[in-house]
Image (tube, helix red, strand yellow):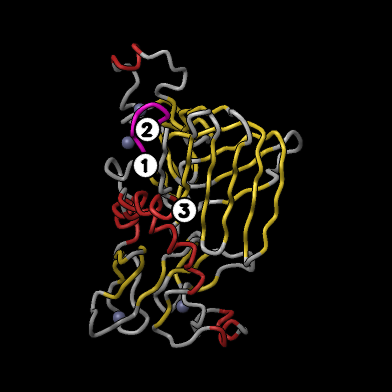
Amino acid sequence: MTETVHVYAGDCTATYHRDGDATHQRGRVVVVHKPDGTVLVHDAEGYQPVQWLTRANAVHREQGEDGSFALVAVKEDERLRVESHDRGDHARHDATPAGVPVGTCPDCTGAKDVEATTSKSAGTLVWARGAVACLHCPTEHRLPGDATVLDSACDCGLPRMAVERGARFELCVDRGCEGLDEVVRERFDREWSCPNCDGDLQVLRERTLFLGCENYPDCESSFALPDEEVVGECDCGLPLVETSDGPRCLDRDCDESEDGESEDKSENGSENDVIETDDGEKGETEKDDEAEGEADDEMEDGEADESETD
Ligand SMILES: [Zn+2]
Ligand SMILES: [Zn+2]
Ligand SMILES: [Zn+2]
Ligand SMILES: [Zn+2]
């Protein structure tokens, strides 16, 4: 996915406002305006900008007929204004996410448009910010938050990934090719029984994958799928998972489990309400898991409200 980064250079004054205070700095600087609304003002030294505003709500750019320019970035109570004192430089550059190269894109490798292009990045897949994306075409696959991209490739040409859901699952990064829900279900659906009513536990999804009793709504038992590896079965019917302290019941409050009497017990509330709070990470995962549409949502808060007068 290619976007545009604007680069300005010149003798500028950068003014940063917050809570009625203003800081002025003047120098010959390079200003970078990224598509997510981030504005960075770099001087001659160091890696750090002398002024910046990350993911501004709006960035307004002006370019005078004499070649001078001004940028104003606004984010809540912060404001960054950069104004050139003379004729400055302005350039636009294509930019993509930068990540670990993880193979070549099956959607555009070998295609005529790749042969025609001189771009060296054509067809390269990179793993960046929770997604595998092609540097050349719009192909992008969002991954579960805890996924690791592997060296091996799927038959479809895309790389494979590893995800821990009670076991290590290796599957295609494209959920249309191989879905996480299906492989987890195939392995763990009805594998264990409900500690409360002895019904089967099914692998279900509601935002996150979880184990839910087949007798719902009469029985509301539900359990988060563990990040840890399943190493056996507890007397209560639930899986035992491997932890650094040894195996424990998936239900931290379980009385059948050896460490059922441990201090863990006080931490959790009712017995049934066991979608663990440490699932926060997984919640995020699912968000990524959900749909391509999510990516668009993310863009929204970074989207810069641009206007140019050149
Ligand atoms: Zn591609
Ligand atoms: Zn595949
Ligand atoms: Zn039940
Ligand atoms: Zn148990």
Residue count near mark 1 (Cα–Cα under 10 Å), binned few <14, some 14–19, many ≥20: many
| Above-or-below relation of 240 to 271 | above
Q: Which residue is mark 1?
A: 141
**Quadrant, the N terminus:** top left
Residue 164: assigned label: none
- Out of 265 and 24, give the one closest to the viewer: 24
Is 274 inside the magenta-drawn segment? no
Point out residue 70 in the picture as x, y percentages from the top left corner. 54, 41
The picture quadrant where one finds residue 204 is: bottom left
Q: Quadrant of ligand 2?
A: top left
Q: Which residues are magenta?
A: 134-141
Point out residue 33 in the picture as x, y percentages from the top left corner. 53, 40
Residue count near mark 3 (Cα–Cα under 10 Å), binned few <14, some 14–19, many ≥20: some
In what element is the residue under mark 3?
Answer: loop
- What type is the residue that disc 3 sits on? Gly
Q: Which residue is mark 2?
A: 158
Q: Is residue 159 visible?
A: no
> For the stretch drawn in magenta, what is the main secondary structure?
loop
- Out of 41 and 216, give the one closest to the viewer: 41
CA gap, disc 2 and disc 1? 10 Å
CA gap, disc 1 and disc 3? 12 Å
In what element is the residue under mark 1?
Answer: strand
- What type is the residue that disc 1 sits on? His
